[in-house]
């Protein structure tokens, strides 16, 4: 199998590239530069070279698009513009490249986000739930998915990524710091939902979607059992053997992080119904099991 990945230097991208190298696949990374070769057995192509010669991707089975400016920064006006445009530009470039290929990829996996459902403490969302555009993040995801839909003549899957848990990146390491200092606790009210997923299941479900030709459209990249923040905090404390007695008031996050604080103070209960209906077996469907593995 021949796989092309954009955004391969990010947390998910690095794990995905390593996974396919171990599987014996031919892996192509699409990047702005060929200066760094991430792993042996990987070919790096630049966006510029593909613009001039898209035929370099002839015969690719799947393209996985994870590229985009990190949302983990203070959302100034300029940062918001970079976050949006980086996603739209990459999706548009892929649409152009694919349109000029004689043999289209069988599938394109485009990253998306669960923020498209909006924020709620009481509702449950699956892939049939309508979009609810109510803030910056949900607006970004809506535009990102619309850009991905312009890719023609191939199966399109939009992975609505949840809170990805891993040892070497993502949301978990900074969340563990208060517990290491014995001052861990819930964030804000603790009632906000956290729709999480173990990094191994994130990689597994992407591969499952590529191989299962019946899957298309939105796919929620979350574990089947989301939890509220207070329960997430309690489970971290239990697994680490550290106290969970020190709640952090919401206003502190709002002062320090501005709008970015919504990532921790707000949430949604997201169910991966498409994956469940198509028989994907999660390695880590239970939060305590996932954290025990990671910690």
Image (tube, helix red, strand yellow):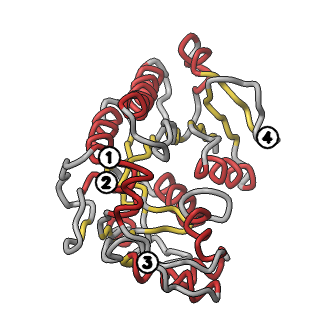
Mark sitting on residue 41? 4
Sequence-earlier tag: 3 or 1: 1
Mark 2 surroundings: few (<14), some (14-19) or many (≥20) residues within 10 A: many
Q: Mark 2 points at which residue?
A: 115
Q: Name the residue under label 3.
A: 247
Separation of marks 3 and 4 at Cα, in angstroms: 47 Å
Residue 214 visible at all: no
Find numbered disc 1 in the image and state the secondary structure of the residue it sits on: helix
- In the rendered image, the residue lying farthest to the top is 52
Residue drawn at the location 45% of the way across and 57% of the way down:
212
Separation of marks 3 and 1 at Cα, in angstroms: 25 Å
Sequence-earlier tag: 4 or 1: 4
Sequence-earlier tag: 2 or 4: 4
Separation of marks 2 and 4 at Cα, in angstroms: 35 Å
- Residue 39 coordinates in the image, percent (x, y): 78, 42
Find numbered disc 2 in the image and state the secondary structure of the residue it sits on: helix
Mark sitting on residue 137? 1
- Residue 121 coordinates in the image, percent (x, y): 23, 72
């Amino acid at each position: 199998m021949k796989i092309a990945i954009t955004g391969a230097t990010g947390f998910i991208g690095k794990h995905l590239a390593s996974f396919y190298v171990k599987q014996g696949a031919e892996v192509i990374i699409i990047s702005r530069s060929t200066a760094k070769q991430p792993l042996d057995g990987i070919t790096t192509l630049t966006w510029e070279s593909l613009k001039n010669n898209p035929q370099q991707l002839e015969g690719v089975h799947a393209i996985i698009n994870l590229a985009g400016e990190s949302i983990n920064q203070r959302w100034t006006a300029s940062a918001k513009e970079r976050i949006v445009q980086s996603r739209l530009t990459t999706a548009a470039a892929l649409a152009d490249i694919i349109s000029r290929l004689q043999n289209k990829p069988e599938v394109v996996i485009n990253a998306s986000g669960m923020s498209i459902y909006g924020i709620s403490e009481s509702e449950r969302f699956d892939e049939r739930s309508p979009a609810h555009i109510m803030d910056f993040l949900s607006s970004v995801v809506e535009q990102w998915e619309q850009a991905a839909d312009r890719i023609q003549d191939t199966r399109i899957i939009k992975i609505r990524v949840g809170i990805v848990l891993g040892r070497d990146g993502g949301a978990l390491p900074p969340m563990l710091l208060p517990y290491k200092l014995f001052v861990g606790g819930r964030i804000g009210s603790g009632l906000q939902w956290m729709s999480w997923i173990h990094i191994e299941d994130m990689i597994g479900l992407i591969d499952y979607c590529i191989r299962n030709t019946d899957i298309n459209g939105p796919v929620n990249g979350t574990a089947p059992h989301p939890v509220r923040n207070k329960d997430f905090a309690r489970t971290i404390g239990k697994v680490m053997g550290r106290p969970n007695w020190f709640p952090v008031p919401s206003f502190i996050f709002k002062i320090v992080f501005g709008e970015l604080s919504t990532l921790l103070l707000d949430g949604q209960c997201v169910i991966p119904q498409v994956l469940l209906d198509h028989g994907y077996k999660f390695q880590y469907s239970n939060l305590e099991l996932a954290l025990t593995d990671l910690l």
